[in-house]
Image (cartoon, helix red, strand yellow):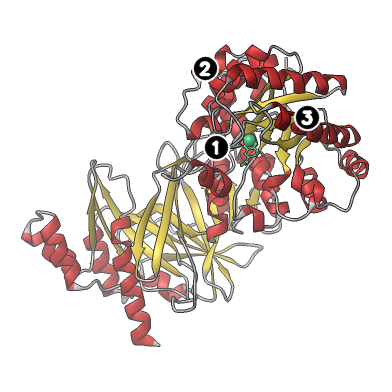
Amino acid sequence: MDGPEVRMDIATVCLSGTLDDKLAAASGAGFHGVEIFENDLVVSPWTPREIRRRCADLGLSIDLYQPFRDLEAVPPDVFAANLRRAGRKFDVMEQLGADTMLVCSSVSPDAVDDDDLAAEQLHELASRAAGRGIRIAYEALAWGRFVNTYEHSWRIVRKAGHPSLGLCLDSFHVLSRGSGITGIKVIPGAKIFFLQLADAPRLRMDVLQWSRHHRLFPGQGAFDLSAFLGAVAATGYAGPLSLEVFNDVFRQSDPVHTAVDAMRSLLVLREATARRGPERMRVAGLPVVPPSDGYAFVELTAPDPAEVLAALGFVYIGQHESRPAHLWQQGDARIVVRSDADVRIGALGVATPDPHAAARRAKRLLAPALSDLDYDDPAVRAPDGVGIVFCRPEGDWMADFTPPDPALVTTCGITGIDHVSLTAPFDDFDQIALFYRAALGLEAEPETEFAAPFGLIRSRSSADAGRRIRIALNVAALRRGDWAPAVREPQHIAFTSDDVVASAKAMRELGARLLDIPGNYYDDLAARFDLPAGRLASLREYSVLYDRDEHGEFLHFYTHMVGSRMFFEVVQRIDGYAGYGVANSPVRMAAHRQFRLSHE
Ligand SMILES: O=C(O)c1ccc(O)c(O)c1
Ligand SMILES: [Mg+2]
């Protein structure tokens, strides 16, 4: 039996705009409640009563008022002033209908290192709060002057021993300090008054700066939030799961999008947590991801790529019976071409045994559905605009194409699709990466950064367990000034071949425009790897690049640009090489630049 509904909240500080923008966005994304940040209230033209009414109209409860700072362990005169300040805030909370106030551990120069005094003063505050029907949630900031771990805040709360005083646990403060989570299990759930969830990338920097600028939604960073939430759930905590993310980019982004990304991240976190135990976290109506059978096809939009595809050895199969979509194939690599002035990846056809369940999952994760006028199979749109079409592996979706020629040739040795490489605007990178992982059940692979001719590129790939669906995401880490070319990072489709050198040779014979790699690269390769001379010579002759990891070797080559931001790659993975040849990306980028220069 399902327990009571898990409440999902968001702090107003996560979202851009003024309070009305934030509340509308939170409600629109399906949140149940909010934490109201004092600043958002102070600058609002609405009275607290009007805010309460507005929230009620939007179906939002106000579950926390925050933050109250620098209350405890201070001299009597300072404490008296703090109590007066708290009294005023209780007035506001009463009008808001908010029953829990967050008190952050002190950073004040007035504070002393005295747990007894802190407990006594928090007890006094809690007594006054209790008289107003209010509870106090005490939160250890990771940079608190004397209290900066949850274990310490719990000792003080226990010592104070007041029923209206409990803890606020915030995953950032706990995990940023590397505190273990076992200590959470000894806290009675009823004494955890509030739970804040935030992820963050692993950065070596001052913890306050890290917290105020770089927090991310769960699943977008490096913290193990499902272990954290699992530990909190095990205490019996039954309050809201509330996202509290301070992030410079989100503060400037469309709050409607941010709120949707936030909700998706919370749903995925609940699913991951439920998998580790607490059934209560399970998300109703979110089917598990069925294992994928790889790419059924990739849809390419282009004005007329026939010449390019033919030169790569693709064979034209035919046109869809009712739509202007054209199928090209070589081995198991299928490209569906839709005519469009812009050359880009329009959609990914993902083969799955249960397309409807997969689409239901993506929609439950807030992806908009695509019209069945555009695709025969259930399809959704990813946040970067790319369609995801879920189809059965046996290829029902191809029924509308003229049956392929049984003697389908594989002129150039392409056997299938290895990966697609998409690009995201820097500001949306983490959200888009999380979307693909969540919707398609992919695991994040390590993030890398490399220096390209026109700036640093951040690259993160994900793949499913069977390594059938691989998606690489690349983004320029920074875009400043107007020297660097204004073209967005290109997308590409990478095909597999069992003999990349032979494929390159065959494609060159068909007139394919493959990228020439400079000799310096091969001289450097010879220095880095002890490759047999004959092998090195054939790599050099056909401009095939090389990489190696702890598993095996990787051989690959690229085409010229098709349009302004699309190219193709052919790859050969030997002995389970797991990467993407990222080390060679700057060489490719310089070569594409060289080609542009000589043709502009
Ligand atoms: O950065 C801060 O001051 C701050 C305030 C309130 C919080 O809940 C928090 O985690 C941090
Ligand atoms: Mg917090």
Answer above or below: position of 479 versus 552. Answer: below
Q: Which sits earlier in the primary sequence, circle 3 or circle 1?
A: 3
Q: Position of residue 176 (x, y in %)?
A: 49, 35
Nearer mark to the viewer, of 1 and 2: 2
Taking the spot 50% from the left edge, 22% from the top edge, the residue there is 181
Q: Residues within 10 Å of mark 2 (few under 14, many from 20)?
A: few
Tell me the number on the disc at residue 83. Answer: 3
Q: Secondary structure at mark 1?
A: loop
Instruction: List the residue tagged with mark 2.
Output: 183
The CA distance from mark 1 to mark 2 is 43 Å
Q: Is residue 4 visible?
A: no
Q: Amino acid at mark 1?
A: Pro
Question: Would you name the residue on which mark 1 appears?
Answer: 353
Q: Which residue is pictured at 91% across the width and 46% down the height?
A: 47
| Residue 155 higher or lower than 107, as above or below | above
Q: Secondary structure at mark 2?
A: helix
